[in-house]
Amino acid sequence: MSYMYLFLSLCLFLAVANDIKAHKIPNLLVLIIISGGILWNVYLVQGISLITSAIGLLTGMVFMLPSYILGGMGAGDVKLVAAIGSVVGYHKVIEVVMYSYFAMFVMAVIFIILKGDLSKVIIRFKMMLFGMLGGVFSYQKPYVTEASAQEIPLAPAIAFGTLYVLFPDNCTIVQLVSLCRN
């Protein structure tokens, strides 16, 4: 296990705490992760190359940027994944993005169910689907009071996706459930 992965885990913990508390991921924290990742990967034998680190940063940003442009996440989330890419490289950041998006989807569904708005979301989805089948694109924006219109912190999902990629043997469902029981 790499010391850089432990450092990244600590930084992710700080990002999650700040995102939950203030709905922001500090630029300084992102810069520390990028600097640490590039320095680790360039100057240490265990690290990946500067090029792989830089491509990882760009890959993380490119894969998350559409969600930012469409309003699905904040710029801090995009920068955080880009910073993670500078640590893990482009090979692993693609996995991080995939697992993070999955965790975001699960979080959003749970949030909508807990707020009692699942039926509203299903109705809007059916209207949109049937409209598309009929050749008309129709989208009804959710009301501001509905769960699907509210912002939720995404750093926990990004942290989950990252930790699952970095430590796959320690992220099984059974272990997560046992942590919840204690």
Image (tube, rainbow, N blue to C red):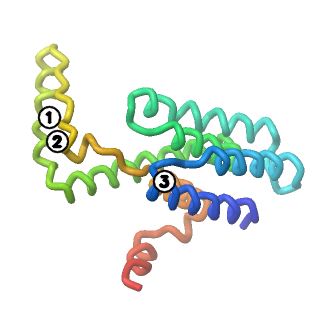
Which sits in the foreground, 117 or 164?
Answer: 117
Left or right of 24? Residue 113 is left
Instruction: Give how far apart the Cα atoms at labels 2 and 3 are.
Output: 25 Å
Q: Amino acid at mark 2?
A: Val
Q: Quadrant of the N terminus?
A: bottom right
Q: Amino acid at mark 1?
A: Arg
Dot 1 alpha-carbon crowd within 10 angstroms: few under 14, some 14 to 19, many 20 or more: some
Within 10 Å of disc 2 (Cα), the crowding (few <14, some 14-19, many 20+) is some
Q: Residue at x 61, y 59 (%)?
A: 166
Q: Are marks 1 and 2 in contact (CB under 8 Å)?
A: yes
Q: Nearer the viewer, mark 2 or mark 3?
A: 3
Residue drawn 15% across the image and 49% down it:
117
Q: What's the mark number on residue 101?
A: none
Q: Residues within 10 Å of mark 3 (few under 14, many from 20)?
A: many
Instruction: Please provide percent x and percent y for residue 35.
Output: 77, 46
Q: CA distance from mark 3 to mark 1?
A: 29 Å
Q: Tell me residue 38's x, y (percent).
A: 79, 45
The location of residue 110, given as percent across then percent down, is 27, 57
Residue on which disc 2 sits: 121
Residue highlighted by disc 3: 19
* Image quarter (top left, top right, bottom left or bottom right) of the C terminus: bottom left
Residue 124, labelled with which disc? 1
In the image as oriented, which residue stretches furthest toward the front? 22
Q: Please, what is the three-letter code of the amino acid marked with disc 3?
A: Asp
Q: Is residue 94 left or right of residue 112?
A: right
Q: CA distance from mark 1 to mark 2?
A: 5 Å
